[in-house]
Amino acid sequence: MKIALLQYPVVWADPQANVGLLDERLQAIAGQVDMAVVPEMFSTGFCTDRPGLAEPWGSGPTCQALQHMADTYNMAIVGSMMATDQGKLYNRGFLFSPQSAPQYYDKHHLYASGGEAEFFTPGNERKIFEFRGVKIRLAVCYDLRFPVWLRQDKNNLYDILIVVACWPTIRIQYWDTLLPARAAENHCYGIGVNMVGTDGIQLDYNGHSAAYDTWLKDIAGFEDYEHATRIVDLSIEKLRHFREVLPQWQEADEYELENKRVNA
């Protein structure tokens, strides 16, 4: 599966501009990839105190544009956006795919220090997406710090962990450590896409987007602050062979996850 990692600045609080910039980037790689991954809150930036920027899920202009791009360019698009659904506000991770209903995951671990928990509702479902025969687990930024939430279910393995983020430079060392750790412990490919630049509240982002193969080698290779698209080719057959040779997933500890985050 060929996946494009799109590391670029997000225009603060301007969904129309961000959708237009994404369309340009996707048009440039049409026919070359199966999937494109964009940063967290790609259409607004991490505007956690501006709930008025959220759009109705499914019917809003950003969702309509994402579906149109997925159909037009014949690729899946993965990221997150501010969305309202049945009167609640979510940081909603999504996978839009050609000619199909979108799949979504609501960010579970809200970043209280960044104001996210004040307005947003946490999601409670640990979902696995499927696209072209590949199983994908999506996490949104702060979720990366919580290994139990992302732990593989050995009866329903996922192949790729994708993390979309607005992870600032001042804490980038944790991103650099945790992303390969989650890939290693879950015996999967790991992809992380972060934004670059300075946002509307003057937080700095230096990117460090990455794609880790079965040997934990970063095969994407972004420079600090680089505005770029990198395409990686992930062999799901190789991954599944690797799991057969080293069947660590079969020895995973059994556990039950007690969910303490209850929707208001």
Image: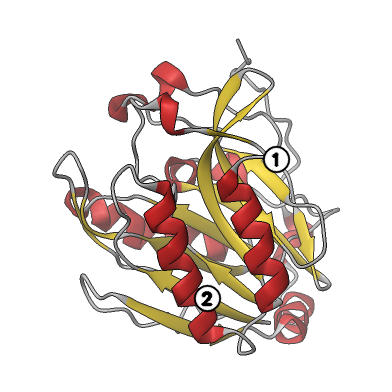
Q: Position of residue 80 (x, y in %)?
A: 52, 48
Q: Secondary structure at mark 2?
A: helix
Residue at which label 1 appears: 126
**Percent from the top left, x then y, of residue 68?**
67, 63
Is 33 or 107 nearer to us in this picture? 33
For mark 1, does the 10 Å Cα neighbourhood hold few (<14), some (14 to 19), or many (20 or more) residues?
some
From what the image shows, is residue 37 above or below residue 49? below
In percent of the image, x 51 and y 67: which residue is there? 191
- At label 2, the amino acid type is Leu
17 left or right of 240 in image: left
Nearest to N terminus: mark 1 or mark 2: 2
Which residue is depicted at the point 76% across and 41% down? 254
Circle 2 Cα neighbour tier, 10 Å, few/some/many (<14 / 14–19 / ≥20): many
- Note whether residue 211 is visible: no
Residue 144 visible here: yes
Q: Position of residue 129 (x, y in %)?
A: 75, 55
User: Mark 1: which amino acid?
Assistant: Arg
Q: Position of residue 211 (x, y in %)?
A: 48, 74
Disc 1, SS: loop
| CA separation in Å, label 1 and label 2 | 28 Å
Q: Up-down: is 42 above or below 52?
A: below
> Residue 26: which disc?
2
Q: Residue furthest left?
A: 202
Quadrant of image for the C terminus: top right
